[in-house]
Image: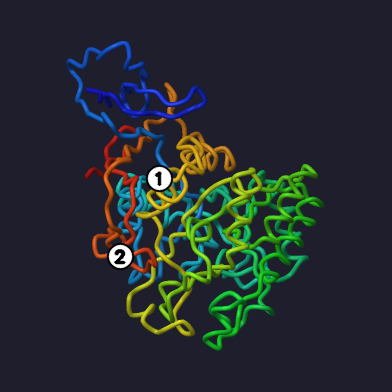
Amino acid sequence: MGTWILNGLTVGREGQSQRHILVDNGSIKQIADAAAGLPDTSGHETIDAAGKLVAPGLVDMHVHLREPGFEHKETIATGTRSAAKGGFTTIACMPNTRPVIDTVDTVKYVLDKARTEGNGVRVLPYGCITKNELGRELTDFTALKEAGAIGFTDDGVGVQSAQMMKDAMAFAKSLDLPIIAHCEDNTLVEGAPVTEGAFARKHGLKGIPNESEAIHVGRDILLAEATGVHYHVCHVSTEQSVRLIRQAKQLGFRVTAEVCPHHLILSDEDIPGLDANWKMNPPLRSPRDVQAVIEGIEDGTLDIVVTDHAPHSAEEKAKGMMLAPFGIVGFETAFPLLYTKFVKTGRWTLRFLVEKMTSAPAEVFGLPYGRLEEGLPADITIIDLETERAVDPASFLSKSNNTPFGGWKLHGWPVLTMVGGSVVWSE
């Protein structure tokens, strides 16, 4: 028995239209124009999506599930449940766990846990570039790929040695897998909790300068040119980084990049005080940088939106700006934030936002997801565009609720998430 999703609004190259979608045996079996009337639904379940957006399942290529090692912050079970509530059907998890994902056993551990406890959400693990993320010795890329790693990154720390990064890129290129880079020069950031700017000066804090990110972006672009690897830049936050990536693309280098909702919406001028729920890495930058990343996503310099979902316990975040860990949760607010900020205001089309969170990330990483087409996996997210609701961190399904967006009134809330034809979350 299949399921008909009836009367949903879809967006695509042909514009917006109302459609019926038949899901059967895990895939999209039929897409019919609603103008032709209701289909024969006998023998099938039905979901009435009238007045709601029916989108491909959201794809998030940068998340932290914290397991193994940091289960007090998040687990694969709680993280995937939170992802499903946020409309995400495919997520790629970063390897800075404890132990880090630098061996076949840890890759298999994550995949097995995702299979048994992942609430149906598809989890794709990255492997580390260097053993224990120490930057001293490359991991066994071949073995990690064979175990199921989809790319290599030391996210959480930048690879400080240019030679190490060049060797990694050459190795990854030989396996046709990407290098995903956290860009940060350690000599410029030590002991700094926020960006260099007015907020840091006001509170007597050391600031993280823009060039700490951009220096690695520029270095790595040159190394990517030399090796021919697919080089992907994590969580771009600065005007200088956008400029370098734009130039690299103009020159035809194989460079892609991502941006997070918080870097598109908030600047350091928005930080209300010494609340560590506003502490993240990269930090919130200047309004000028915010404008640069907005223009970067709009002109295609930045390819995709990711959450960088980074849960931490309330006790950890209570330690204050200097001692608290960097990071905020993102699964359950990402689409509503961007829909409210950019689509409701008319700056972006609905199709643009949906593509940056579905088909674009799938295309960048060569995944067969992110599109509503007959024959493809039935990964589908139904979103209520009309109801306004306040962000309530206490209601998050994540194990943590470290967010600067508590109380924000937003539209665009996912109400049903389906992976491979199975409903994994429903309001």
Q: CA distance from mark 2 to mark 1?
A: 19 Å
Outermost residue to the bottom: 204
Q: Is residue 268 above or below residue 11?
A: below
Q: Is residue 104 above or below residue 274?
A: above
Find numbered disc 1 in the image and state the secondary structure of the residue it sits on. Answer: strand
x, y (%) of residue 395? 24, 60
Instruction: Residue under label 2, please give it.
Output: 399
Looking at the image, which residue is at 33% across and 72% down? Answer: 72
Task: Judge from the rendering whether residue 371 lies leftward or rightward of residue 379; answer left or right.
Answer: right
Question: Could you classify mark 2 by the number of other residues whose Cα lies within 10 Å: few (under 14), some (14-19), or many (20 or more)?
Answer: many
Q: Which mark is residue 251?
A: none
x, y (%) of residue 308? 48, 59
- Screen quadrant of the N terminus: top left
Looking at the image, which residue is at 69% across and 79% down? Answer: 187
Please indicate, yes or no, whether residue 46 appears anywhere in the rendered image: yes
x, y (%) of residue 343? 45, 43
What amino acid type is highlighted by mark number 2?
Lys
Q: Is residue 19 above or below residue 174?
A: above
**How many numbered badges does the structure rendering display?**
2
Question: Could you classify mark 1 by the number of other residues whose Cα lies within 10 Å: few (under 14), some (14-19), or many (20 or more)?
Answer: many
Outermost residue to the left: 42
Instruction: Residue under label 1, please give it.
Output: 122
x, y (%) of residue 319? 39, 84
Task: Judge from the rendering whether residue 71 lies leftward or rightward of residue 124; answer left or right.
Answer: left
Looking at the image, which residue is at 54% across and 70% down? Answer: 283
What amino acid type is highlighted by mark number 1?
Arg
